[in-house]
Image: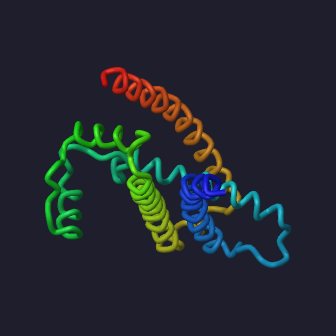
């Protein structure tokens, strides 16, 4: 049961941020066209909207990552905004702040003799990072959509949906290719590190 809960916390909790963020964007678009869901809508429509919302939330996070407005992996040395935020939040500057220290620590984190509480702390921070890097951009875009209502409503709703789905499809296709590359590179990096130990 404990393993099931950890799986839920690790993956589903993070994925909920995609669903929530994408839903905010979808609802903003529907709101400006006066097409909000009602109690009379059939249940299957909610499942379709949920799936599209998930994809939109995922794409928005990745898009902001591709244009370097959001970072998903630590950069060494830290960028100026990371240094500023860390200084404001924690007051003290970290003593160990280079890429090799991070990779060594991450390798140690998943060894059998490492206490579970350290992995749990790391995973919690990872989940919170996912929430911030997904919901932040989604809420930002939703605010822009609502602010631009006057200009967006001049385009017919069916065209907005059509063009939006085409763009979402193309972007998801490209993200699939990106993830294939990232997955293989990550595996090779782990393999080489463990081989060197």
Where does the image place residue 27, in percent across and percent down from the top left?
Answer: 62, 70
**As displayed, is residue 73 above or below residue 189?**
below
* Residue sitting at x 55%, y 42%: 171
Would residue 80 be found to the left or right of residue 166 on screen?
left
Q: Is residue 149 visible?
A: yes
* Residue sitting at x 18%, y 58%: 83
* Residue sitting at x 31%, y 25%: 197
Q: Is residue 129 visible?
A: no
Question: Can you name the residue that lies furthest to the front here?
Answer: 113
Where does the image place residue 29, in percent across and percent down from the top left?
Answer: 60, 67
What scheme was used to colour the molecule? rainbow
- In the rendered view of the protein, which quadrant contains the N terminus? bottom right
Question: Can you name the residue that lies furthest to the bottom here?
Answer: 39
Q: Looking at the rendering, which quadrant does residue 196 occupy? A: top left
Q: 164 and 56: which one is in front?
A: 56
Q: 88 and 94: which one is in front?
A: 94
Q: Looking at the rendering, which quadrant does residue 24 occupy? A: bottom right
Where does the image place residue 150, in percent across and percent down from the top left?
Answer: 52, 73
Q: 16 and 168: which one is in front?
A: 16
**As displayed, is residue 123 above or below residue 182?**
below
Would residue 16 be found to the left or right of residue 51 on screen?
left
* Residue sitting at x 23%, y 36%: 100
Where does the image place residue 107, in percent across and percent down from the top left?
Answer: 35, 38
Would residue 141 be found to the left or right of residue 55 on screen?
left
Q: 77 and 50: which one is in front?
A: 77
Would residue 150 be found to the left or right of residue 104 on screen?
right
């Amino acid at each position: 049961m404990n393993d099931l809960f950890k799986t839920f916390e690790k993956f589903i909790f993070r994925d909920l941020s995609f669903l929530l963020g994408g839903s905010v964007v979808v609802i903003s678009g529907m709101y400006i066209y006066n097409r909000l869901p009602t109690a009379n809508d059939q249940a299957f429509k909610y499942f379709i909207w949920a799936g599209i919302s998930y994809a939109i939330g995922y794409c928005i996070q990745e898009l902001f990552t591709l244009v370097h407005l959001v970072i998903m992996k630590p950069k060494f040395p830290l960028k100026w905004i990371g240094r500023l935020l860390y200084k404001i939040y924690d007051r003290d500057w970290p003593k160990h702040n280079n890429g090799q220290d991070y990779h060594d620590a991450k390798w140690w984190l998943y060894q059998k003799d490492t206490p579970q509480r350290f992995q749990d702390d790391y995973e919690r921070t990872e989940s919170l990072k996912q929430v911030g890097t997904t919901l932040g951009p989604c809420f930002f875009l939703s605010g822009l959509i609502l602010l631009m209502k006057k200009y967006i409503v001049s385009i017919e709703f069916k065209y907005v949906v059509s063009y939006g789905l085409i763009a979402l499809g193309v972007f998801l296709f490209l993200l699939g290719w990106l993830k294939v590359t990232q997955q293989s590179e990550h595996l090779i990096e782990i393999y080489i590190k463990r081989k060197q130990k």
